Amino acid sequence: MGAVQWLLKKVTKVFGRNTNSLFYVLLYREILKEVNEITKNEEDSVIILREIGKQAATESCERHTAVFKWMPGSPKKIVEYFELLWVVVFGKELEEGDLTYQEIPKEGSKYNDYIVKIKSCPLCAGYGLDNEDTFNFQKVKSKDSEGFACGLTGMLESVANFILKIKRNDYRINIVEQKCIAKGEESLQFMCKIYDTIEWKNLMSTQIQDKIKSGVNFEEILEDEVVQETKLDIIDKLQEVLSLDKIEDLLDEPLEGIKEKVAEIIEDKLNMETEHFFDYFRNYEDDLIRIIGFLSIHLLNEYGGLIEKILENDTFAKIAGYLFKQLRDFALLFVPIDVINDYHQLLVNFLDGLAPAEMVDNVKQFSGKDDINYLFEGAQMALENLGIDFSELKDNVWEELRKEREDGLIPSDQSMMEKTEENIPKLIKIMQEILMLFSDILTLPIRVLISEGHYGLKTAINSVVSEEEGLFGSIHIKLDNIFDQIQEIRK
Amino acid sequence: MNLTREDLIQSDATMNQMRNMVYYLERFMKINDVSEIREKLRRMGRNIARTYMNYWKPIDFVNLTNVRDVITTIYKKILNSTVSVELDEIEKVVRVKDNDCSLCKYPFNDIEVAGCEIIAAMISEFISLINEEKSLITLQPIDIHESRTFGNKFCLHSFKYAEGGA
């Protein structure tokens, strides 16, 4: 999966409001059942649920237009990004190898058709085993009828076409559920067909009211063709050149080289002066720094998804959460201000010459302390995204170490702190290690500035990653110590 | 191998679009002159609880002592909501305040029944099912009048409670 697709999936999940998947699926089932209570006709219910799904998704897309600006603008690419559509709609990633494509050649047409197969459908999971699964899919007999995923299919189609609409593409995608596990078939299967404007209008000309036999009323919403021009259009162009892989290449070069490369990309691909480009971020400099914190964590995670894997374990996620909170709390108290200001100077040096003087001045107005706060805010968002639930963390690690309640319930009151005296020495040791670890990391900007004229950022990073003498080795040892101590306490 | 409902409990799904479906369902009910929309939504909530209980049960019994914790746990585990629960022993009412209700976010002028009626009914049914054989406490949802759907800053789910299954 490409970096942009990966990043968009993460961003989509960060901004989503999640519930447990079983609640989602049961709510979906109940909506279908209520529709059927009105139509008293299973085939009509499936048609109407699809339309409800389409309307619901369109409304949601219209509220978050900016997010979809990052999506690819061609119908073929959108079909290839089906998994991303799935995450946008359902919020749950598919298992490795769960989704397969098959391209069906279409004579005389610009685009082929696609069959998308999903092995494990979450909606059909266990359908029919519980007493409340009363919608009878055996009554959905017509060969053109969809199945349980009809509402989801409507949502997917709406999201796909909303993207094409805001990208000013004249083509539209029709997504139809061809196979459904609840109907007795082996997998969930979609057929995706791409139509030009005229074909699409013909396809859409049949009113829902004409398709249904039960005579119930349904209010259709017509597609609004007018798309407002927005400032965010530069994102469409940026996405061609800005991916995490390319950021990685840039890091191989010294600071001046990076600046030149960034300027080159902006001028060549966006046809903009670098100053003009950075002008978009003028007066939003704090957000720019937050994004750096956010992306840094995700960039680290790119190497084998190690962070995400570690955080899958609830205990490790909590430990990481507390470490992060402590780092944030203690950084500004204990780290020498000169070190923090070195970081700030590095940022100013980078922007100087690239960004408008006013923006550089604005950044200069920040203190090193502000930079650190913004970076931590961005990093915290990324860590939440990767699995740390900060809202679940107690005020401090002492409360977490308290014996859990035997009934497994979550107290409705604020937690009662019980200090365990025997653990205090171990906790102090952890704090010491954390502080030393943080000091080590903060020597990085000095290394970067020194190496700038000689070997560039790469040299600095190499000096960091040397297992024996570099920063990595030092961090590695300290992290080992921290985990050992936490392990001891948990025993 | 296909997924099971036990598998679904281990993962999360995004409600952004599903939340809207509830309101389009309400609109569909309205244009088809369905009466008692509130009761229909509550029926949905009760059905969700009945199925959900086959896969997850927070505790073996609920009484006045632990009812607040049980409610907090259900909201957290199922809806990812951190709520504040208030027990009014004089009026015999439990009030749950959810600042980030999973079914309500935007105000709608054309909607008279908040989507979170589903949640309130689900919670009350959960408590009834847990106490099925013990009749220690029952909760009856009260009509929701404060909701983000109506433009309020939070959703307030209130329940009249009765001890001893009355």
Image (cartoon, rainbow, N blue to C red):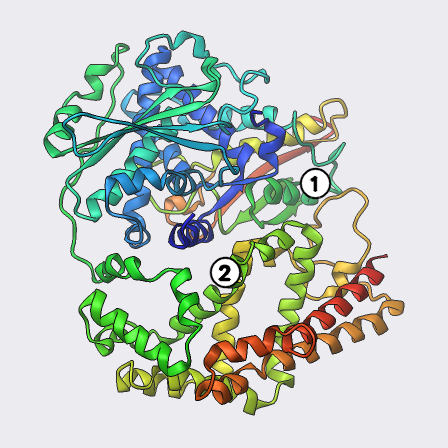
Give me the residue at 46% from left, 64% from top.
A295
Percent x, y of residue A378:
48, 67
Say what secondary structure mark 1 lies in. Answer: helix
In which quadrant will I find the C terminus of chain A? Answer: bottom right
Question: Considering only vertical position in the picture, is A94 above or below A429?
Answer: above
Q: Nearer the viewer, residue A375 or B152?
A: A375
Question: Considering only vertical position in the picture, is A184 above or below A202?
Answer: above
Q: Nearer the viewer, residue A98 or B55?
A: A98
> Where does label 2 land, which residue?
A298
Percent x, y of residue B158:
55, 40
Question: Considering only vertical position in the picture, is A177 above or below B17?
Answer: above
Give me the residue at 65% from left, 46% from top.
B87
Q: Amino acid at mark 2?
A: His
Question: Considering only vertical position in the picture, is B2 above or below B81?
Answer: above
> Where does label 1 land, which residue?
B67
Q: Amino acid at mark 1?
A: Val
Say few, some or many: other residues with alpha carbon within 10 Å of mark 1 (under 14 / 14 to 19 / 20 or more). Answer: many
Report which quarter residue B47 is drawn in: top right
